[in-house]
Amino acid sequence: MSNNTETTTATSTTQVSESTVPEDTVLTTTQDAESQAPITRVVVIAIDHSTHSQQAFYWALKNFLRKENDLVVLVNVRSIPTVPGPYAAIGASYMDFSEVVTSLEEQHRLSSHSLLQDFASKLKAQNFACKAIAMKGDARDEIVRKVAELNADALVIGSRGLGALKRTLLGSVSDYCSHNCHCTVIIVKERVEQKQ
């Protein structure tokens, strides 16, 4: 585990961890005792608030996940809040933004936990063993790090559908993960309705 990471574990309830560390295990569930088989595959699904992420989740649920022996790990990476734009640009180092940044971080953390709980509840309702992890930092680096740490067998991630120029200038999380993860990376593209 990296030196900026600490994990807290919640039981199979849906309560949010009160920790403000860079990484929180928001929820851990197991299968019902009668249907429990040994876990033979770890599948990480990267989620955020985008429709691309939602499509990737539902694609995996319908086409890829096996409830009999998969551990599904949901990960959400939130960015680290910084000093508001114009104040940082003028070098307002004499102003104390610590309360603003702390408040923003708490809002982002709660939003991340809520998102993870929503998706985890869908898995729990279908009797999947799952774990939901909230992290903060650069999404590309944190997803690759967590996939390696879990020794995951597959990563499912949505495609943002960036144009060629934006993809070249900004890079994409899915592209970065496909080149840097040691496991199979499934990039779920946005489904475009065909006109007839």
Image (cartoon, rainbow, N blue to C red):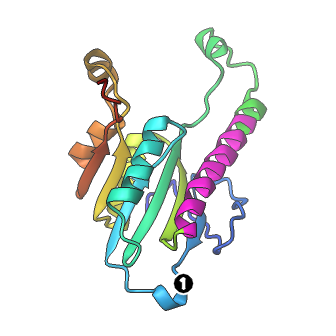
**The disc labelled 1 sits on which kind of residue?**
Asp
Q: Which quarter of the figure is the N terminus placed in?
A: bottom left
At horizontal 33% and vertical 18% (from top left) the residue drawn is: 166
Q: Is residue 146 visible?
A: no
At horizontal 29% and vertical 44% (from top left) the residue drawn is: 187
Magenta region, mostly helix, strand or loop? helix
- Give left or right: position of 14 versus 29: right
The image quadrant that residue 164 belongs to is top left
Q: Which quarter of the figure is the C terminus placed in?
A: top left
Task: Characterize the local packing of mark 1: few (<14), some (14-19) or many (20 or more) Cα atoms within 10 angstroms.
Answer: few
Q: Position of residue 143 (x, y in %)?
A: 39, 50
Q: Is 34 in front, or is 81?
A: 34
The image quadrant that residue 93 belongs to is top right
Q: Is 38 in front, or is 9?
A: 38
Q: Position of residue 63 (x, y in %)?
A: 33, 58
Q: Secondary structure at mark 1?
A: loop
Q: Is 92 in front, or is 50?
A: 50
Q: In the figure, 40 relative to 99: above or below?
A: below
- Give left or right: position of 187 versus 85: left
Q: Identify the residue position indicated by label 1 in the image.
A: 32
Q: Position of residue 161 (x, y in %)?
A: 34, 28
At horizontal 64% and vertical 11% (from top left) the residue drawn is: 86
The residue range painted magenta reads 103-125
Residue 49 highlighted magenta (yes or no):
no
Q: In the figure, 39 relative to 8: above or below?
A: below
The image quadrant that residue 42 belongs to is bottom left
Q: In the figure, 168 relative to 40: above or below?
A: above
Q: In the figure, 127 relative to 7: above or below?
A: below
